[in-house]
Image (cartoon, grey):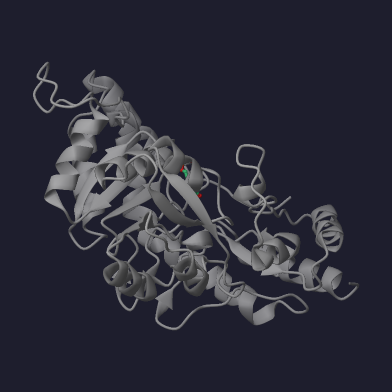
Amino acid sequence: MIPAAKPIIGDEEREAVDRVLRSGMLAQGPEVKAFEEEFSAHVGGRHCVAMNSGTSALHLGFIAAGIKPGDEVIVPSFSFAATANSVVLAGGVPIFADIDPKTFNMDPDHAQSLITKKTKAIMPVHLYGHIAAMDRYEEMAAKHGLHLIEDAAQGHLASLNGRNSGEFGIVASFSFYPTKNMTAGEGGMVVTDNAEVARTLRLLRNQGQEIRYQNEIIGFNTRMTDIHAAIGRVQLAKLPGWTKQRQENAAYLDANLKGVITPYLAPGTTHSYHQYTIRIPGGDAAKRDAFMSKIGEKGVGSGVYYPTPIHRLPSFKLDLNLPETELVIKECLSLPVHPSLTKDELKTIVEVVNEVAATL
Ligand SMILES: *Cc1c(COP(=O)(O)O)cnc(C)c1O
């Protein structure tokens, strides 16, 4: 079976972990600092603050950006639950917008229509590695006096007009969960161009203290360990090459798949293909599910990200009308695109998908 996702862990990661274990200093220290500095080079030299997860990065990012109880934050419903959970954890209220079915990302026009007096921030998600319409959101945020925040958990090295994800919002949050384009085991990174916000994030992550036992504010413990940072540093060095490989794999699939809707690339963007997501037209989830089990029987793994929009999860249970989200949720599935795919595996994916698509 060709798996839908596959973390790549090699000798360098093992040696890096061993180096930290031998040093005897395991908690946040020099590896975390070096990881932050190295990450900064990929986000226009912005401040970087490492966390123990992408969810912590989002949560503390909202607090540091000044989200207060009752503030509304516009987010897409077609995303991972952490996108909206983190708004609620910071005391805010997620307002769910529909998507543009071409890019799978939040629809800027619908997001704009949801702005009220209570709106404090807009947080697009760079879903599957396709950067959101950040030029539109920058304009909107400036016009309405809102914070622009990026959920870049899936957006490592995705870009728009030469600017990488992480270079747009007052804060942007990345994830290093094992299935993401690079991993630290677990982990996250908050990126900001604001020195004051960066300092607040460093305080929030460490019990509100910069100097030990001189706690300035109420904080959390969401520190990253040096063990995780050591893995992250090795993976970060490999990320540009892996991203290029994902793009080449995607280009091969784009050129050869037939009978399915392949991913769209908006003008001016580079896609980092966290997922390679296709659509089975017809708005029929049973047809999509049958397609997935047939390609699975022939050895091609796939996944649905996400089978339920966030607003309909038991944790939110909201009755909203988001027609494009509801349509795409029935049609989408993600095929393997990870950088360790061989030429033979890519050929197999094309043969199997085209064969099954021809019987639809
Ligand atoms: C993975 C992910 C997160 C959360 O990151 P964790 O590191 O798993 O906490 C948040 N938002 C999106 C869109 C994600 O894909």
- Location of the C terminus by quadrant is bottom right
The percent coordinates of residue 186 (x first, y second) are: 43, 36
Q: Name the outermost residue toward the right.
A: 359
Q: Is residue 233 visible from the viewing direction of this image?
A: no
Callout count: 0
The answer to whether one can see residue 348 in this image is: yes
Residue 322, given in percent of the width and then of the height, sits at 64, 63
Occupied quadrant, residue 211:
top left
Between 191 and 136, the one nearer to me in the picture: 136
What's the residue at 23%, 48% (across, down)?
48
Residue found 49% across the figure and 40% down from its top: 85
In the image as oriented, which residue stretches furthest toward the front? Answer: 117
Q: Quadrant of residue 122?
A: bottom left
- Height in image: 24 above or below 237? above
**Residue 61 image position (x, y, % from top left):** 31, 44
Residue at figure coordinates x 35%, y 75% from the top left: 135
Q: Residue at x 69, y 54 (%)?
A: 304
Splitting the image into 4 quarters, where does residue 206 fall? Answer: top left
Q: Is residue 236 above or below residue 326?
A: above
For residue 182, side relative to residue 24 (left or right): right
Question: With 161 as the anchor, is 344 left or right in this view?
Answer: right
Q: Residue 342: x, y in percent?
A: 60, 61
Q: In the shown orientation, is residue 246 left or right of residue 289? A: left
